[in-house]
Amino acid sequence: MSHLLEMRGVNKSFGAVAALAGANFVLDAGSIHALVGENGAGKSTLVKIIGGLHERDGGEFLLEGDAVEFQSTAAAKDAGIAVIYQEPALFPDLSVAENLFVGRQPYTGRGTIDRAEMRRASRELTKQLGVYIDPDREARGLSIADQQIVEIAKSISLNAKVVIMDEPTAALSGSEVDRLMGIVRQLRDEGKGIVFISHRFDEVFSLCDTITVMRDGAHIATSPIGAVTEDEVIRQMVGRSIGNLFPKQEAKLGDVVLEVKDLTSAGVFYDVSFGVRSGEIVCLAGLVGAGRSEIARAIFGVDRYDSGSVTLNDMGVPKHNPSAAMKRGMGFVPEDRRKQGFAMTASVQTNITLPIRNSLAKLGILTSRMEVASAATWARRLQVKMRALDTEAGMLSGGNQQKIVLAKWLATEPKLLIVDEPTRGIDVGTKSEVHRLISELAGNGVAVLMISSELPEVLGMADRVLVVREGRITREFARKDATPEAVMYAATHATEEVAT
Amino acid sequence: MTLQKAPTPRTAATTTVPVRSVVERLFRARELSLLVIIIAFIAVTTAVQPSYLLSAGGWRDLLRGPAMLVVVSIGEAIVILTRNIDLSVGSILGLTTYLCGDLMHATSLPILVIVLIGLAFGAALGLVNGLLVAFLDVPSLVITLGTQYAYRGIAVLWIGGNFIRPEWVPGSFKHFGLSQILTIPWLFVVGLVVMLVSGWFLSSRRGGRDLYALGSNPDAAVLYGLRTRQLTLVPFMISGLLSGLGGIMYLSIFATGDSKVGIGYEFQAIAAAVVGGVAITGGSGRVWGVALGGFFLATLGTALPVLNVPSLWQQAIVGLLIVAAITLDRAFFIVRQRQARKAVSE
């Protein structure tokens, strides 16, 4: 008998970055199949290809033994595939019942939508899942858990054969997780094939029967759940040579530059305390959604926080005031440079000199010549590859864009630089240049706070690793103690026991 | 050593949350409050000058006057529902008016055929808008701003200093603009039919609900596999068609028209939609509300002079109403979000 779903040697690239390189995946009916891997291992891309959102560049895709080619999400849906994303995508203005039946509402004999029937069917569907959700209320304001229930109910009524859940439990409380797991088992018993993506190993091991590990866009291993241990899975997830791709120079550690005390923002992070010394690189490691970026944004003053304090060189940094933070000597390279760090349509030189506009200007007037002089220095030092300084910044490659964002902050000569995912979406060659730059900065006595989801980067660069899990710093590793397995284990487990 | 498990950052709500209060429900019934305001307004105006309502001409004008705005506003509202906007309705209306007037003069086609040509012409101009927006992925604000000028430019080039002379327009057509059935003007009936048909489509057909879905969450519409291009395109065609109808109604009322007919009409149409409860961000609003919004704005235009309000104030009052309507919507949106968030954190 053929498998329910089978993918062989699937490739997918976005620009220069390969998201999938020879990915294999096999799903059987009546099975709950865990798909695990580090952030950026290619799980989401694989899911989007199965769901018809992306088209693959190469490789085979079989559904019940037949080759399929999805041009659209509608085609995937018609073929019996339902994808439930981490943040479910409902229509907030429509009622719950309509969300369940958009595009296929039941009609009465007179050719109008049969609301009574729709209400009845939606009540029945949610009841089947052991929940009551008022079919007439609008979807806006439903809890994430209930939104997921609506999505699952939809997949049931669509008669989906394959149900993919992308980190469904990330935003749920304990009892909601139990409820969800009950529903997933129920779906399995009805003969559906379920793909369960999760970073929580306790859930994976109690719920799933098969586990597939992905790394760097490729398939690593598929095993029955009983045949592997958590430690083995973690090793498969992180197992790659770190080498000297990330050369952190030894720097003399100076005084404490940044001091964060009991920083709390309800619902986001709690009691965060740490310090960063001059010349030191401190990394916040952890899973996406653990609260790392939020902590960084609060320190710089982009986001508000409820209590706690931030001091820089023994001076208090006011809350929620990025321009004060900049004046005191902080720089911030955000996670999403296209949205937050970068004026895409402005020229390279304007981008670089943006934060030093005022100090550069004479008598309040900024001439293009002053911009050019300052920008050229930095562009040269960073080896930005571009045709001219007045090139539109958005036309450059991701790596060069990132260098410009860095240049922009280096020009302010910061005492503390916060970098959030500095190498995301950047090709390998440029990556190591970015690393060299950050390391040089530390060598010059700048304190660096780095956030990265790439373990090798964290381990290669950091003097100290702080693991953030569910909004708290749960572990701290010195450089010599930070092994990939230990850090990954700490990021995925609530306890402090370390895997060996 | 074991650390305590960190509390999950987000805990979820109980299954159902009564998100709307009674007061809000009342206010949300925009149609009801609009109706009350309209009736009160007409009552006051009639008290000041009884002939405003209580004369044959007054009654007729009260019902007939708003019909054109109502029809065009409904088209505009359908576009806004899908999170787009159509700034070219006034230009389409003007072009169609002149086209039909010219055809009546220059050809001997039956009036019905000319009307159908006018409707098709409006729909075709709307189709151009729709194609550009759906396939170029350029915001409709920019596209229709462009076509607004382009269509108007065509009108100026074509019409020049000419205008439709009343004698071009056949008597029977002019008569239609004035005539009534059981004291109800035919133009009012036209508006009513447009409202009923579009209202039925939007609330009771899958295609209509798909438009709400698209406007409510375009990303989800893609994930859900709705045909988003088609759903983007069709409303512009409907809007063009109804603008064309508006132009034909204009001709039947005034039996004249030059290259300037319909200038600025898009803003009245948008205002009617917004005052009538259509969210400018798409996804919510009802045709009945839009019709009442259009009726209200048009009535305001005729009643304020009767009440001796200086004409300078009239625009300010309309503006104030729009701001009030949007502010009210926004306020309730925030309240609802806050309640939802509170429910989630409990």
Image: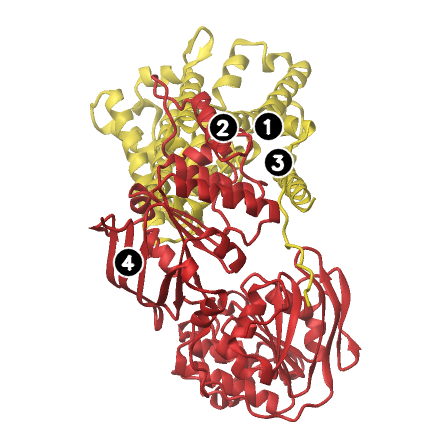
Chain colours: A red, B yellow
Q: CA distance from mark 2 to mark 1?
A: 29 Å
**Is the C-beta separation of discs 3 and 1 under 8 Å?**
no
Mark nearer the viewer, 1 or 4: 4
Q: Could you tell me which chain the residue with mark 4 belongs to?
A: A
Q: Residue at x 42, y 41 (%)?
A: A187
Q: Residue A466 bears which disc, if any?
A: none
Q: Earlier in the sequence, mark 3 or mark 1?
A: 1
Residue type of the residue flagged with mark 3:
Ala
Relative to B177, say whether A171 is above or below: below
As drawn, B299 above or below B231: above
- In this rendering, is residue A230 above or below B102? below
Quarter of the view holding residue A293: bottom right
- Residue named by callout 1: B30
Q: Helix, strand, or loop for circle 2?
A: helix
What residue do we see at 67% from left, 29% from top? B309
SS at circle 1: helix
Question: Can you tell which of label 2 and label 4 is closer to the viewer?
Answer: 4
- The furthest residue to the top: B182
Residue B279, given in percent of the width and then of the height, sits at 54, 38
Q: Are marks 1 and 4 in contact (CB under 8 Å)?
A: no
Q: Which residue is mark 2?
A: A123
Residue at mark 2 to residue at mark 3: CA–CA distance: 35 Å
Tags 4 and 3 in contact by the CB under 8 Å rule? no
Disc 2 vs disc 1: which is toward the camera?
2
User: Percent from the top left, x then y, of residue A58?
Assistant: 24, 64
Q: Which residue is mark 4?
A: A7
User: What distance separates the C-alpha of mark 4 from that of mark 3?
Assistant: 53 Å
Residue A182 in the image, given as x and y percentages of width and height: 50, 42
Q: Chain of mark 3?
A: B
For disc 3, the marked residue is B325
